[in-house]
Image: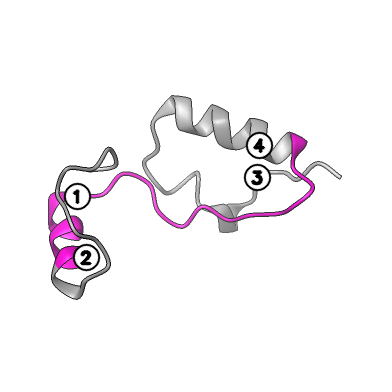
């Protein structure tokens, strides 16, 4: 069963690189498992907060 994008997935309100949006759409079209994308590009401030809380370890990531 192909899945489709919904507002809950947040692709409309979250900043994603176009290649990632295309990859997400392809994955949804062929996946038998539903999934949710919870975060797109991060601001430096968001990454800093994640490092402080231990949820991330570095600033050298592709989504900042």
Q: Find numbered disc 1 in the image and state the secondary structure of the residue it sits on.
A: loop
Cα gap from disc 2 to disc 4, whole angstroms: 27 Å
In the rendered view, does 60 fall on the left or right side of 21?
Answer: left
Q: Find numbered disc 3 in the image and state the secondary structure of the residue it sits on.
A: loop
- Identify the residue shown where x is 56% and y is 31%: 23
| Circle nearer the N terminus (3, 4) | 3
Cα gap from disc 1 to disc 2, whole angstroms: 11 Å
Stretch in magenta: 30-51
Q: Find numbered disc 2 in the image and state the secondary structure of the residue it sits on.
A: helix
Q: Nearer the viewer, mark 2 or mark 3?
A: 2
Q: Which residue is mark 4?
A: 27
Cα gap from disc 1 to disc 4, whole angstroms: 26 Å
Q: Nearer the viewer, mark 3 or mark 4?
A: 4
Q: Residues within 10 Å of mark 1 (few under 14, many from 20)?
A: few
| Circle nearer the N terminus (1, 4) | 4
Q: Which mark is residue 5?
A: 3
Front-most of residues 61 and 10? 61
Is residue 53 depicted above or below 47 in this figure? below
Q: Residues within 10 Å of mark 4 (few under 14, many from 20)?
A: some
| Circle nearer the N terminus (2, 4) | 4
Cα gap from disc 1 to disc 3, whole angstroms: 24 Å
Q: Which residue is mark 2?
A: 50
């Amino acid at each position: 069963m192909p899945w489709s994008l919904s507002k809950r997935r947040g692709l409309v309100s979250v900043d994603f690189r176009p290649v990632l949006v295309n990859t997400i759409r392809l994955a949804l079209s062929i996946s038998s498992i539903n999934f949710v994308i919870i975060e797109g590009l991060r601001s430096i401030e968001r990454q800093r907060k994640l490092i402080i809380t231990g949820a991330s370890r570095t600033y050298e990531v592709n989504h900042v």
